[in-house]
């Protein structure tokens, strides 16, 4: 298994500002993902964080709005840029280990944009 | 990508067996089927994963018919603490793993 921590756990931000969310894993992982989850809704995949290269974004998400870094096998950041109230959500980091497709999730970052 | 369809909600009572079925008609040859459980204010938690036939672990069983177009998560003797949202996930498509969650099934266990 993997232990995943996210920082911050929650934040309240003003529109137009940016927030960077950190995801730290206690072991080397193969894949890292970023999700968004609105209250009462399912998880929406934002992107796959690729080590040492640009992230792979899903439809509807772009690098200018959600820049992602993954400098090594245990750490990634997601930035929510130029925030608006519609960006208010829970952001979750997820990883897989080895060759398994079993995913482990972080506790999430609850973002509120005012 | 294989799209999944699950019932939006289910109700059960303590001690009963609960079966949640997920439909994935477009599942590809390389796709695995994975189920997750999510409690409020927490990230999803892995329950079970399978490719075909039956898989059992300490918390659940997963039944997959030969055509693999559906799967059933079986929770034996549920308790109140099993009240959660359950997601069926079908991954690996075209060589890339793109873990896309469906809408999930909200299970409520009553006393």
Image (cartoon, coloured by chain):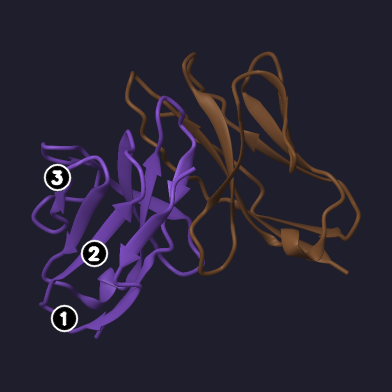
Chain colours: A purple, B brown
Mark 3 lies on residue: A71
Most extreme residue toward the front is A26
Q: Are marks 2 and 3 on the same chain?
A: yes
Does label 2 or label 1 sit earlier along the sequence? 1
Marks 2 and 1, how far apart at CA: 16 Å
* Relative side of B3 to B16, left or right: left
Query: Of callouts 3 and 1, which one flags the residue occurring earlier in the amino acid sequence?
Result: 1
Give the vertical position of A112 relative to A41 (above or below).
Answer: below
Determine crowd level at label 1: few under 14, some 14-19, many 20+ residues with C-alpha closer than 10 A. some
Q: Which numbered circle lies on residue A15? A: 1
- Dot 1: chain letter: A
Q: Are marks 2 and 3 in contact (CB under 8 Å)?
A: no
Q: Which residue is mark 2?
A: A21
Residue at left offset 74%, top offset 63%: B81
Q: Is the residue A76 above or below the residue A85 in the image?
A: above
Alpha carbon separation for disc pair 3 and 1 = 28 Å
Instruction: Tell me if label 3 and label 1 are in contact, CB under 8 Å.
Output: no
């Amino acid at each position: 298994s993997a232990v995943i921590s996210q920082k911050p756990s929650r934040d309240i931000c003003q529109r137009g500002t940016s927030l960077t969310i950190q995801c730290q894993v206690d072991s080397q992982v193969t894949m890292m993902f970023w999700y968004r989850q609105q209250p009462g809704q399912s998880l929406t995949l934002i992107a796959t964080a690729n080590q040492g290269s640009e992230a792979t974004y899903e439809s509807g998400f772009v690098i200018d709005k959600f820049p992602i870094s993954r400098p090594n096998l245990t750490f990634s950041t997601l930035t929510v840029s130029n925030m608006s109230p519609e960006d208010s959500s829970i952001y979750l980091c997820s990883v897989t280990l080895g060759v398994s497709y079993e995913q482990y999730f972080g506790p999430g970052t609850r973002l509120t944009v005012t | 990508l294989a799209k999944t369809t699950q019932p939006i909600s289910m109700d059960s009572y303590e001690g009963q067996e609960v079966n949640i079925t997920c439909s994935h008609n477009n599942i590809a040859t390389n796709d695995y089927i994975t189920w997750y459980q999510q409690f409020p204010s927490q990230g999803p938690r892995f329950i079970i994963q399978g490719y075909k036939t039956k898989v059992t672990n300490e918390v659940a069983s997963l039944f997959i018919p030969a055509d693999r177009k559906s799967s059933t998560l079986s929770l034996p003797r549920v308790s109140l603490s099993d009240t959660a949202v359950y997601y069926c996930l079908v991954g690996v498509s075209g060589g890339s793993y793109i873990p896309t969650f469906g809408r999930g099934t909200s299970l409520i266990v009553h006393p």
